[in-house]
Amino acid sequence: MTDQSRVALAALLGGLAGGVWGYLFLTARGSRLRRELEPRLDDFIVETRRFRATLAKASEAANEGLDAVTELMRYEPSRDGWPRGVQQTSR
């Protein structure tokens, strides 16, 4: 990308951002739109936090499962075939 195209892109993005800001903060319709968007954005933030908590729980469950599999892979049966510390009872 040349310097000239970077300058053009920056000018375009700056103009676009300025236009959006002007519409949202300097017009009655923009003010109305902001009032309508605010509760939706609050809901989005709450849902995003819940999703992150769900991901954290899923990650914790996956780690516990991996630990269990790793422990099973290290399992060495005793001479009688039972795990160490477990004794077979006769009936």
Image (cartoon, helix red, strand yellow):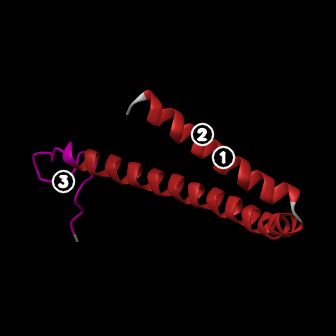
For image coordinates 87% across by 62% down, the residue present is 27
Q: In this rendering, would 10 be left or right of 37?
A: left
Mark 2 Cα within 10 Å, few/some/many (few <14, many 20+)? few
Q: Earlier in the sequence, mark 3 or mark 2?
A: 2
Question: Which disc number belongs to residue 15?
Answer: 1
Task: Look at the numbered discs 1 and 2 and tell me whether their residues touch, using CB distance below 8 Å.
Answer: yes
Q: Earlier in the sequence, mark 1 or mark 3?
A: 1
Q: Main secondary structure of the magenta part?
A: loop
**Three-letter amino acid code at the position of disc 3:** Trp
Dot 1: what SS? helix
**Quadrant of the rendered image containing residue 87:** bottom left
When the figure is inspected, residue 39 is found, relative to residue 83, above or below; the finding is below
**Three-letter amino acid code at the position of disc 1:** Gly
For image coordinates 21% across by 66% down, the residue present is 90
Q: In this rendering, would 4 be left or right of 36?
A: left
Residue 83 lies in magenta, yes or no? yes
In depth, the one of 43 and 11 nearer the eye is: 11
For disc 2, the marked residue is 11
Label 1 to label 3, Cα distance in Å?
74 Å
The image position of residue 47, as x and y in percent, is 65, 64
In depth, the one of 88 and 50 nearer the eye is: 50
Q: Which residues are magenta?
A: 73-90
For disc 3, the marked residue is 82
For image coordinates 84% across by 69% down, the residue present is 29
